[in-house]
Image (cartoon, helix red, strand yellow):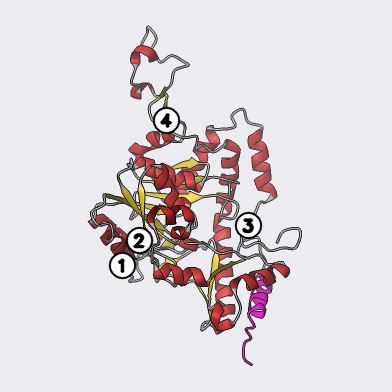
Amino acid sequence: MFKSGFFPYGWSFIGEDDIAAVSEALHHEILTTGPLVDKFELEFAKTVNAQESVSVNSGTAALHLAAMAIDLQPDEWVIVPAMTFSATANVARHMGAEVIFADVDPNTGLMTPETLTDAIKSANGKKLRAVFIVHMNGNVADMAGLSKVARARGLHIIEDACHAVASTYLPLPLNGSQDPILVGACAHSDFACFSFHPVKTITTGEGGALTFNDSSLKETLKSYRTHGIVRDINNIRHPELALDKNGDLNPWYYEMQFLGHNFRMTDFQCALGSRQLEKLPDFAARRRKFMKRYDERFAPFRQVMQPVSRLPGTNPCLHLYALLIDFEAIGRTRAEMMTELRARKIGTQVHYIPVHYQPYYRERYGKIDLPGTAQYYERVLSIPFYPAMKDEDIEFVADNVCDVLGLRVKA
């Protein structure tokens, strides 16, 4: 909880060792694009079993970098599940591309092979280029099934894994003998994008990373995140400007070869990230323990309240613990419930307002009917869930959620 005694819906755990690591990094001569950035990128790639990782200053920047990596064009379209944070769709628009919103399963909040197929059919001759697969709440989408549909159409696959660091899934068919696949290993995708915002499983304050398995892309992606600047003598385009009389690169010389961005992360952020990665196994274990306990506490009330469903063969490290509540059957509105819980020092949130409901997209594409998304949105509520909580905190929250809704276990 916060010092005020309030339980937010999510928060990070920052220990004295994290603070010491940041403090030490601030004493280094290089504060950005230095050795601690390279160190963190290597560690993160290893953590998610990817060949490469490029750090950036937000999960949104990671998504944007992935869109740049596939050279997304203004006459092209991408498919995005409607149940996600708006950034997933926004990066396509920042590239000038257009968005088709796919429906989601009303009980998982995840795009399915069927809803992706429907979205592809609705394209009606539009030039489809990519699909963004979102691991909502940290629950793992059906990567094998979605990949099969997307690859058959020749689409690039970008995972929005901003909620899903440390989540795993088993390859199909499920026969009990396979090794789990880490989200971020890009086993069924071109890129996976992560966020290290303070409410995420690990944090760098603000920050993110892109993982991928094509090592030839790394230098280009690092250039994209740094204004499109290239300094490598082997890749310069104007040697008459770049080289001295001996054929060496002039010490001041650089070329802006692309229209890039300033997406860099600092060394002291990466120092924090490296320290947090050391704690990730413990963070993941605590999240799975708390997930199981919440599941047990709410199991008697499944007719009116249940956790968001998870797919068979997945082992999520949840970022959010979300409930699906039949507010009409209970006789309370979501706003009433949130207000009363807040009075009891329990914070809650709705993740998310469907992106196609937002005025920008509604005005651009008109009203879109996505019934699965609507059913999910009408029932969902995220409750406090993070490693800094204690066992008794989980019980306190569960007790109060049930009490506010008037739910009692029958004797």
Q: Amino acid at mark 4?
A: Gly
Q: Amino acid at mark 1?
A: Glu
Asked if residue 163 lies left or right of residue 286, the reply is: left
Q: Earlier in the sequence, mark 2 or mark 4?
A: 2
Identified at 60% across, 44% down, the residue is 272
Q: Amino acid at mark 2?
A: Met
Estimate the x, y position of residue 230 in percent, counting from the top left.
41, 26
What SS does tag 4 mark? loop
- How many other residues sit within 10 Å of disc 2, few (<14), some (14-19) or many (≥20)? many
400 falls in the magenta region: yes
What SS does tag 3 mark? loop
* Tag 2 residue: 143
Q: Quadrant of the C terminus?
A: bottom right
Identified at 72% across, 69% down, the residue is 343
Q: Amino acid at mark 3?
A: Trp
Q: Is residue 284 above or below residue 309?
A: above
Q: Is residue 235 above or below residue 9?
A: above
Q: Earlier in the sequence, mark 2 or mark 3?
A: 3
Query: Which is more foreground, mark 2 or mark 1?
Result: 1
Residue 67 found in image quarter: top left
Q: Earlier in the sequence, mark 4 or mark 1?
A: 1
Query: Which residues lie in the magenta part?
Result: 393-411
* Tag 1 residue: 114
**In the rendered structure, are the residues bearing label 1 and label 3 in contact, judged by CB atoms less than 8 Å apart?**
no
What SS does tag 1 mark? helix
Q: CA distance from mark 4 to mark 3?
A: 34 Å
Q: Earlier in the sequence, mark 1 or mark 3?
A: 3
Q: CA distance from mark 2 to mark 4?
A: 32 Å
* Tag 4 residue: 228
Residue 365 found in image quarter: bottom left
Residue at the limit of the structure toward the bottom, as seen here: 411
Residue 11 is tagged as 3
